[in-house]
Amino acid sequence: MALIEVENVSRTFTVRTRKGRLRREKREVRAVDGLTFAVQAGECVGYIGPNGAGKSTTVKMLTGILVPSGGRLRVAGVDPSRDRVRLAHRIGVVFGQRTTLWWDLPLRDSYELARRIYRVPPDRYRKNLDRCLDLLDLGPLLDTPVRQLSLGQRMRGDLAAALLHDPQVLYLDEPTIGLDVVSRNRVREFLREVNTERGTTVLLTTHDLTDIEQLCSRVMVIDHGRVVYDGGLEGLHAVGESERTLVVDLAEPCPPIVVEGARVVRVDGPRQWLAFPAARSAAPVVAAVADRYPLVDLSVREPAIEDVIARVYAGELATEPDAEQPRASVG
Ligand SMILES: Nc1ncnc2c1ncn2[C@@H]1O[C@H](COP(=O)(O)OP(=O)(O)OP(=O)(O)O)[C@@H](O)[C@H]1O
């Protein structure tokens, strides 16, 4: 069952800019432009894109904060902007840069307020709170005012607050921003648990691609308000036409190696770097090098996901996705 349905959704903003000393000019900004996707119950989907791509605008429409200019939206059976109260009971939202907790109150009081606002039955509240306290190690912090918490502690506190009412969908906007390695790992482990054990559907917006690699089996890349890729991370490598690198150490410095299917991208004394398509096997390149050059040692480096995404953002997508990437689409 699709828990999030987005059909041909658009959102336009009118921006007034100064033209000369007195004149002002109206300009339309299409933040989201014919966006279409569906997220099934239980999925954990990464929603990524360069700055200004339209991610926040999408999330604001999905939470009912913004009304779409056109198209159709459904989240957990509800039209977000028309029925925000009903929607609030079905979704949880965490923004890495803002808190939903009460700044001057201890965590415990914020949770108690959430319980009342969402009318969570006492036994369910107790069970959910105990689980979050345990998994996020929040017990010792319950009586600390939120303003005294570190960023990592506050983020863990926010995550618990977003889940006390058992939402079906959890939106996360940069949940690990500014956190140290230990806090980051703890948050990721918790989110994995929430998604796999509780079956909560997660839509994750982040610029930290490790979040996506560790949590999401599916990623949507958005640019200029449209989905430009929708599929697995592996497929993204193919669409981004990424390359692996064969690093070879020769017995002595040689002129740049010439072999079929690879090209030299760097030479440093007896060491040379050869790039070849990530989708191809390294074996024929290695065999050709070993056959003709005094090969001493070698290693193969995988492309960094950051580089692949950067290529996709830069518009270096293959012109048309092939049948092997079923959900890939070029806008
Ligand atoms: N309230 C607004 N008024 C005018 N323009 C807006 C408004 N909100 C967003 N925009 C414009 O819409 C486009 C998409 O913005 P949005 O914030 O959705 O991008 P984003 O993908 O979340 O970016 P980032 O990664 O920087 O947060 C941008 O060009 C932005 O300037």
Image (spheres, grey):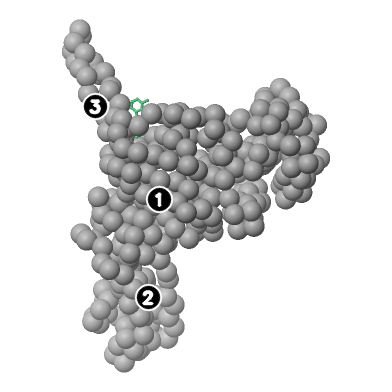
Is label 1 or label 3 in front? Answer: 1
Q: Residues within 10 Å of mark 2 (few under 14, many from 20)?
A: many
Label 2, on which residue? 246
Label 2–label 3 contact, CB within 8 A? no
Question: What amino acid is at disc 1?
Answer: Ala
> Residue 278, how many percent across, how many down?
35, 71
Question: What amino acid is at disc 2?
Answer: Leu
Q: Name the residue rendered at 45%, 51% in the picture.
A: 2
Q: Residues within 10 Å of mark 1 (few under 14, many from 20)?
A: some
Label 3, on which residue? 28
Q: Is residue 16 above or below residue 134?
A: above
- Judged left or right of residue 167, residue 142 is right
Q: Secondary structure at mark 1?
A: strand
Label 1, on which residue? 38
- Judged left or right of residue 313, residue 169 is right
Q: Is residue 14 above or below residue 218?
A: above
